Image: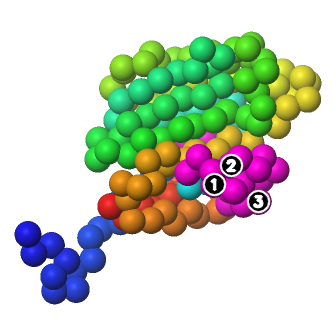
Amino acid sequence: MFKGLFGKKEKNNKLYAPLKGEAVLLENIEDPMFAQKILGDGIAIEPSEGKVYSPADGTVSMIADTKHAIGINTQDGLELLIHIGMDTVALKGEGYTPKVEAGASVKKGDLLMEFDMDFIKEKGYSCVTPMIVTNMDDIKGVTPHAGAAVPGETVVVEYEK
């Protein structure tokens, strides 16, 4: 009832890097849907390996039929979308190997998906992978952190509920 009444700020919550690589701000990527934050706010990773890990404890809410996107609902109610590559829906699932199923409980750092970076690039697509919060109305704000990203270790997004 009196939470925050005496200047106590609610602790920032953290999302960890879902891929190894370089975290870049969404506004610096080429896809306008993500760069303009139409679907939500977050961060993007320029991956250095083809593995996606859970950025937080939660439940896998969906894996796209085309395997290029994973949804996660965190334990504290965040809805995340990890979109592996740009325009990769056109690959129709080729090059992607899910390691979990929808409905699975996951912990921060659990392997969710493997993808063939060379195959994706050979087909002419970027491997840049946005991770966005899709239920922005349920939180106060997002603070992304660019730089080197290590799954399960590097905080790439802080958010306030």
Residue, disc 3: 28
Amino acid on which the number 3 mark rests in the picture: Asn
> x, y (%) of residue 95?
74, 16
Q: Secondary structure at mark 3?
A: helix
**The C terminus: image quadrant:** bottom left
Query: Which residue corresponds to the image point at 53% horizontal and 38% vertical from the top-left?
Result: 81
Query: Which residue corresponds to the image point at 38% horizontal and 59% vertical from the top-left?
Result: 139
Amino acid on which the number 2 mark rests in the picture: Phe
**39 or 48, which lies in front?**
39
Give the class, few, some or many, for how many residues have Cα within 10 Å of label 1's Cα (few <14, many ≥20).
Answer: some
Amino acid on which the number 1 mark rests in the picture: Lys
**120 or 77, which lies in front?**
77
**102 or 18, which lies in front?**
102
> x, y (%) of residue 58?
34, 35
Q: Are marks 1 and 2 in contact (CB under 8 Å)?
A: yes
Residue, disc 1: 37
Q: Is residue 33 magenta?
A: yes
